[in-house]
């Protein structure tokens, strides 16, 4: 599923398939290889009855034979990886490439400022599985796993009133109404020009309440110019900067507010807000320090535990993150967001059974939690339960009709279940939502090929290459279709383009070698097979390396005996 843990792709049979799907694990794949580099290569199988020069109809591999086998029909659809981070070792059998949806490694997003929580959504893991690339067969569709991510909680200090600090709202999975700032009343140290400063503070609160954040900042600026020790003005301006995405400015304001320690704002709120701003800049260690400051002052601060868990997860401290989310649930047993975030982390560490339970708990508390359904669907897909995955992805898109990752992963699940037409419909919907979605076109190409619609598959692979001219797997898959149609010269050109895009693409060398052999170009075939064998060996694909050795030896002998033309 979403690759919280690195899942290895399942190898498919190594025959050259017209457009076979690659098997993708639903978990997030986080290897360093480029998923685009993977393509299934037609595996040369030597039928005893044919010579390396004579093209023949597809035949099954015969152990010990010395001639390559022509491309065969692609096998049944394969499962896909989580939409978040899918990576696979280069040049392996069909592996999922990362689609751009919420795929495999679900990751929890920071909770939003406490002031008003918003509903968490996962995207990119939100896990999305990307289609893998065909080796001997066309590759499996990759979907972007939505990496489940929890939305950040909102800053605890809303435009504050100069009277007792407003109650900070705890982050929940659902969005709540915007905080309405109350009129300010001066309770902090009065400085020179304080009455005018208070007037500007009130104007800032009013502008904030009307959604005019920039105008609010201008009013807070004026208040601070009149009274440089006006702590509440720094807090309010920091909050406005946070909502505007000016996180460094927010950090500076919260830091000044902490120094001033205004009496009408609780210090834990300011630390929490600054921690959220640090997290937004990916300075998670500084964020941890601030969350610790909050918890030293309030050991039951659910929002601080929630955000500290997110920071621990971002730093790879998964055990600490799981412990913090557990603390949230002790304080707030009804927190769907805490269950969801813990599920994301457990998915990352490969504990799918407990992650499944956490997503189910989040759904029970919030039946409209689209991201929780999505992430649970990724686990079902990874475990091979295509129907359960389809059910969860369907619920996701019913809740959120624009959940592209869910459409792509449902398409992958339909492919796994053998329903190419339903998969085509889902990938088409994803394309409707995003006309430049490379993964959706690639996956639909796999589905079209699986349905026997070669022309449509070629059109989709061609569109992929318009959007991403270096998508090596698309060249390989399109080349496989041309090969299956008997157009070996065009296939050779596509395999060559695949090699240019990814010189480590063993499958493209393998397939081009097969095409050269059928075209009677023994020397070119020998060169390609030797290069493919070297790459297979370097990449740990021992079976593929050994498979090519008898063929390479036979070709060497025949090339050596071949008469030299004057």
Image: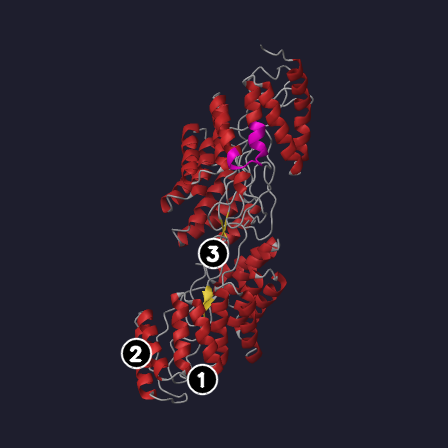
Q: Nearer the viewer, residue 294 or 514?
A: 514
Circle 2 residue = 203
- In what element is the residue under mark 3? loop
Task: Inspect the magenta stretch and tell me whether residue 503 lies in it.
Answer: yes
The image shows residue 395, relative to residue 419, as above or below, that is below
- In what element is the residue under mark 1? loop
> Percent x, y for residue 75?
55, 31
Residue 262 is marked as: 1
> Percent x, y for residue 539?
64, 38
Q: Earlier in the sequence, mark 1 or mark 2?
A: 2
**Which marked residue is nearer to the observer: mark 1 or mark 3?**
1
Q: CA distance from mark 1 to mark 2?
A: 19 Å
The image shows residue 330, relative to residue 411, as above or below, that is below
> Percent x, y for residue 504?
58, 36
Circle 3 residue = 122
Q: Nearer the viewer, residue 168 or 232?
A: 232
Provide the residue span drawn in magenta: 500-511
- In what element is the residue under mark 2? helix
**Which marked residue is nearer to the observer: mark 3 or mark 2?**
2
The reply to whether the C-beta atoms of the residues labelled 1 and 3 are less than 8 Å apart is no
- Residue 255 visible, this angle: yes
């Amino acid at each position: 599923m979403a690759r919280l843990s690195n899942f290895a792709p399942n190898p498919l049979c190594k025959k050259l398939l017209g457009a076979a799907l690659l098997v993708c694990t639903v978990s997030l794949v986080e290897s360093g290889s480029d998923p685009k580099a993977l393509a299934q290569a037609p595996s040369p199988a030597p039928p005893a009855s044919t010579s390396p020069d004579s093209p023949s109809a597809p035949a099954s591999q015969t152990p010990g034979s010395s001639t390559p086998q022509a491309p065969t029909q692609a096998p049944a659809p394969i499962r896909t990886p989580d939409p978040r981070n899918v990576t696979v070792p280069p040049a392996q059998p069909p592996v999922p490439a990362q689609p751009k949806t919420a795929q495999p490694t679900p990751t929890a997003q920071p909770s939003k400022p406490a002031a008003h929580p918003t509903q968490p959504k996962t995207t990119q893991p939100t896990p999305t599985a990307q289609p893998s690339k065909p080796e001997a067969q066309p590759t499996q569709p990759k979907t972007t796993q939505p990496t489940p991510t929890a939305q950040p909680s909102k800053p605890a200090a809303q435009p504050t009133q100069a009277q007792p600090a407003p109650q900070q709202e705890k982050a929940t999975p659902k969005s709540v109404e915007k905080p309405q700032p109350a009129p300010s009343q001066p309770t902090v140290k009065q400085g020179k020009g304080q009455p005018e400063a208070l007037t500007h503070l009130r104007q800032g609160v009013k502008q904030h309440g009307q959604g005019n954040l920039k105008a609010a900042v201008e009013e807070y600026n004026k208040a601070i110019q009149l009274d440089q020790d006006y702590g509440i003005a720094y807090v309010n301006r920091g909050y406005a900067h946070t909502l505007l995405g000016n996180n460094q400015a927010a950090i500076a304001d919260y830091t000044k507010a902490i120094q001033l320690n205004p009496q009408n704002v609780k210090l834990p709120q300011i630390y929490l807000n600054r921690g959220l701003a640090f997290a937004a800049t990916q300075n998670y260690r500084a964020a941890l320090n601030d969350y610790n400051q909050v918890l030293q002052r309030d050991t039951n601060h659910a929002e601080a535990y929630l955000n500290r868990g997110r920071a621990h997860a971002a730093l790879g401290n998964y055990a600490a993150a799981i412990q913090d989310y557990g603390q949230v649930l002790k304080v707030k047993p009804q927190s769907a967001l805490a269950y969801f975030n813990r599920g994301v982390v457990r998915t990352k560490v490969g504990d799918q059974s407990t992650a499944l339970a956490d997503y189910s708990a989040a759904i029970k508390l919030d039946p409209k939690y689209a991201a929780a359904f999505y992430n649970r669907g990724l686990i079902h897909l990874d475990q091979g339960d295509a129907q359960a995955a389809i059910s969860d992805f369907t619920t996701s898109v019913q809740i959120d009709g624009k959940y592209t990752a869910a459409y792509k992963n449902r398409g992958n699940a339909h492919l796994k279940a053998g329903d190419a037409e339903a998969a085509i419909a889902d990938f088409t919907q994803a394309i409707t939502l995003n006309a430049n979605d490379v993964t959706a076109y690639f996956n639909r190409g796999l589905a079209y090929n699986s349905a026997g619609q070669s022309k449509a598959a070629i059109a989709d692979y061609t569109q992929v290459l318009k959007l991403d001219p270096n998508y090596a797997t698309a060249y390989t898959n399109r080349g496989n279709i041309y090969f299956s149609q008997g157009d070996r010269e065009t296939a050779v050109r596509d395999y060559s383009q695949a090699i240019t895009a990814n010189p480590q693409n063993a499958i493209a060398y393998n397939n081009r070698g097969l095409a050269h052999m059928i075209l009677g170009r023994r020397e070119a075939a020998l060169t390609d097979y030797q290069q493919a064998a070297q790459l297979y060996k370097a990449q740990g694909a021992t079976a593929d390396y050994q498979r090519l050795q008898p063929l390479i030896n036979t070709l060497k002998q025949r090339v050596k005996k071949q008469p030299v033309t004057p």
